[in-house]
Amino acid sequence: MASKINDLSKLSVHTQTTRPWGIEECAKNYSEAGIHGITIWRNVLENKNLKDIKSLLDDYDMKVVSLCRGGFFPSVNTTQRESAIRDNLFAIEQAAALGAPSIVLVCGADSGQTLEKSREQIAEGIIRILSTAKSAGVKLAIEPLHPMYAGDRSAINTLKQANDMAEMINSSLVGVAIDVYHLWWDDMLKYEIIRCAAQNHLFNFHVCDWNVPTNDFLNDRGLMGDGCINIQEIRSWVEDTGFMGYNEVEIFSDKYWATDQKAYLEKIKHAYLTKT
């Protein structure tokens, strides 16, 4: 078993985790807390100069781990599919400007068509943006979402499906993002983690917890240790493959967003060191 790194050097926090803060506050407060990995959600970049943001991140010694999010390729409407392509090309431009090595793809779904059709459109969309991603040196990480989101957020719901698609596209720039919140229940998870690592397309690893009971399936994620996910075991599977990337804390929580964010950040650090 790989030895777990018990310091903050591989900790990254998603800006959405501390949603009340803008990008400037995230960079400053993460850095001052000793956290130097950041995953940037695109909403915090709206109306911002990307060169200024890159300079800000450099000033605070922040490492951009990934950009969230691209995807949402499927639609019964051709115009919407073309709009999604344009948005993903813009995301690649943003990622390159900020030095983000990967974009996490929340792939999308359309309840007006079959899941199989949505998956076809996801693959087609990724292939269409692939040459631009290659020119920019930006990887594309397919993130499977829990099956409860199959109707509208993602037709990719298991790591097997994500692995199958990455292998079908067959590019070193197309891989997967593993989020324990979405995949902890899957009895094939360990096997599929080994499989994607063997193909060298495990790009991102996200952690949080599943509250029991869960009051809101979108915005009631738990801090590591709050819920029922065996995060330490899943992390060990990931690191046993040789994965050396960051552990990205991605928590959507109305509860935690309503608290003092600096105090919350300290709770994240403690939970990361003791429960992850």
Image (tube, helix red, strand yellow):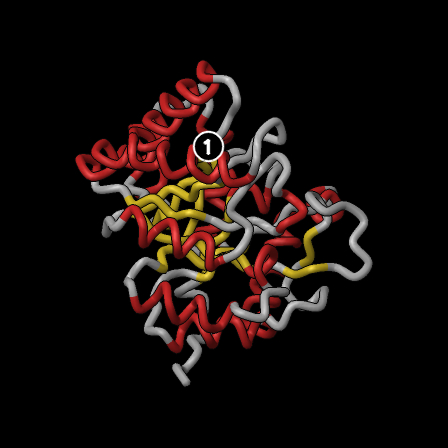
The residue lying toward the viewer, choosing from 53 and 179, is: 179
Q: Is residue 165 above or below residue 186?
A: above
| x and y, in percent, of residue 87 in the image | 40, 24
Residue drawn at (42%, 18%) of the image: 83
Secondary structure category for the residue under label 1: helix
Residue drawn at (47%, 76%) of the image: 236
Residue drawn at (65%, 61%) of the image: 209
Q: Quadrant of the C terminus?
A: bottom right
Q: Is residue 232 above or below residue 60?
A: below
Q: In this view, does 177 lie above or below 238?
A: above
Q: Which amino acid does label 1 sit on?
A: Arg
| x and y, in percent, of residue 120 in the image | 42, 37
The residue lying toward the viewer, choosing from 64 and 81, is: 81
Q: Mark 1 points at which residue?
A: 42
Residue 121 placement, left or right of 158? left
Residue drawn at (55%, 50%) of the image: 157
Residue 198, visible in the rendered structure: yes
Residue 34, visible in the rendered structure: no
Spot the residue most to the left: 135
